[in-house]
Image: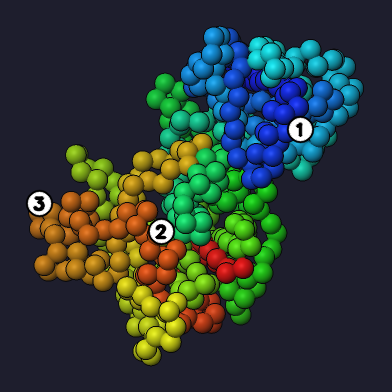
């Protein structure tokens, strides 16, 4: 088993295979597989690989996972989370190292080789960082992904980032109409190394803490290619007179064909003082919004449940007020305005299982519409053993799953209609000023 400070240097020396792989990567940074023999590398173990598509450059850095044997002495290797290094000349790297590194190349045509010695690998990565300083964050992210893949991160900060992760993930599903974009983005997230404490390698658990200002949103841990300083809707929706100074902001942009999704993050509090996470998703083709408020469920014995509190009551009242003031009283004027439900206010109940790096899956939780929530909390709603209200999977059987909710909003079946920009701005302001972290996801029609 290679140590954490080793890696592979792979040269794709077969023209046809090399061209196919390059087309696959450049068409969307998709994972790809190849068959190699690396005996000192355990099955399913994540490693870091440097990829060369000529014998004179290092072109990409990626994660590599060893799979099952496919031919004699060779295993399937899956490469993912690629970062484009911009064809760094090997000669430039060797001049920094005072050592020839071509001898470490694993040639894909021969499919045999080994990991690079730890000291050489560490020096090689530092040399690449020196040549590509703008990519240091992404390179460190891959190192963190390898280190904490399979871990569950706990703590108050992890709880908030877990909710932000769920909000971003469902936004990507709604936007794309499937889970492929979400899987690619979420599985590439990793924490900053200095924020992980109380590491237990046996139990694969750790605590997330000490997040610095500017690095405390989930968006800061995804690939840098999705991040940008500012985007088109930022000033229209996320600024207003007398706005409370932001603790942190962030903008990420995702593309699918000629459509794009802008995701804006705003939080006026440090994570330890953040009261929750809200998602406001605007679907421009159908001119609808949904607001999803996230709640964490806890384990109590054999049950996973959420116990309603005064904060939930206040938040429901705020939702009721906005629903009644924004609901369109006019009849529909187009096909796109038709809804199965024009109530865009939803609560998502998420079992608190810890934040998991290198995973593209959403947690299986419950989407509960505002009206159904009132029933669950009312006199005729389900009660716990002591007669109090509690939210459980069995007690709320009419919830929507992740896929049901995403498909319904994507197709315009549920959500408000006829909402104007000023209404969205007012809603963002109200929920932001309540002490929540806000993700505003705006999907364009072109």
Position above or below: 152 against 276: above
Query: Gap in Å between the C-alphas at discs 1 and 3?
Result: 61 Å
Residue wearing tag 3: 385
Mark 3 vs mark 2, foreground winner is 2
Residue beneath the point at 57% across and 51% down: 219
Residue, far front: 16
Quadrant of the image for the N terminus? top right
In the rendered view, does 17 fall on the left or right side of 182?
right
Front residue of 348/282: it is 282
Q: Name the residue at 43% across, 79% down.
A: 335
Question: What residue occupies the far bottom of the structure in this picture?
Answer: 330
First reached walking from the N terminus: tag 1 or tag 3: 1
Q: Which mark is residue 406?
A: 2
Question: Would you say 159 lies left or right of 108 here?
Answer: left
Viewer can see residue 375: yes
Question: Which secondary structure, mark 2?
Answer: helix
In the image, is residue 169 above or below residue 29?
A: below
């Amino acid at each position: 088993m290679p140590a954490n400070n080793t890696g592979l240097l792979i040269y794709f020396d077969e023209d046809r295979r090399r061209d196919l792989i390059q087309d696959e990567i450049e068409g969307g940074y998709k994972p790809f597989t190849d068959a190699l023999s690396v005996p000192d590398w355990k099955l399913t173990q994540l490693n870091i690989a440097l990829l060369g598509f000529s014998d004179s450059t290092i072109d990409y850095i990626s994660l590599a996972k060893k799979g099952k044997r496919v031919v004699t002495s060779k295993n399937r290797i899956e490469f993912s989370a690629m970062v484009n290094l911009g064809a760094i000349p090997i000669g430039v790297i060797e001049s920094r190292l005072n050592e020839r590194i071509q001898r470490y190349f694993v040639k894909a045509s021969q499919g045999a080789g080994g990991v690079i010695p730890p000291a050489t690998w560490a020096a090689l990565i530092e040399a690449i960082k020196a040549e590509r300083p703008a990519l240091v964050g992404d390179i460190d992210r891959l190192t963190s992904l390898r280190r904490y893949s399979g871990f569950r991160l706990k703590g108050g900060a992890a709880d908030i980032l877990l909710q932000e992760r769920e909000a971003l993930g469902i936004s990507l599903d709604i936007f794309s109409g499937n889970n492929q974009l979400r899987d690619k983005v979420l599985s590439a997230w990793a924490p900053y190394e200095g924020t992980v404490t109380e590491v237990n390698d046996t139990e694969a658990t750790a605590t997330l803490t000490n997040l610095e200002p500017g690095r405390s949103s989930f968006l800061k841990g995804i690939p840098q290619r999705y991040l940008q300083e500012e985007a088109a809707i930022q000033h229209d929706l996320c600024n207003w007179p007398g706005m409370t100074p932001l603790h942190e902001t962030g903008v990420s942009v995702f593309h699918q064909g000629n459509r794009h999704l802008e995701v804006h993050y705003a939080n006026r509090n440090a994570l330890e003082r953040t009261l929750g996470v809200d998602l406001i998703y605007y679907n421009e083709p159908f001119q609808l919004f949904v607001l999803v408020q996230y709640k964490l469920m806890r384990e109590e014995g054999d049950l996973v449940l959420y116990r309603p509190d005064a904060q939930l009551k206040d938040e429901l009242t705020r939702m009721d007020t906005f629903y009644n003031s924004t609901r369109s009283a006019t009849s529909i004027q187009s096909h796109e305005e038709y809804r199965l439900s024009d109530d865009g206010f939803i609560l998502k109940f998420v079992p608190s299982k810890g934040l998991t790096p290198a995973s593209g899956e959403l947690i299986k939780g419950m989407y509960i519409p505002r009206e159904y929530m009132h029933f669950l909390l009312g006199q005729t709603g389900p009660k716990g053993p002591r007669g109090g209200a509690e939210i459980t999977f069995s007690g709320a059987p009419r919830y929507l799953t992740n896929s049901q909710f995403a498909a319904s909003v994507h197709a315009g079946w549920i959500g408000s209609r006829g909402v104007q920009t000023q209404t969205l701005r007012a809603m963002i302001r109200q929920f932001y000023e309540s002490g929540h972290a806000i993700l505003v996801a705006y999907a364009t029609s072109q």
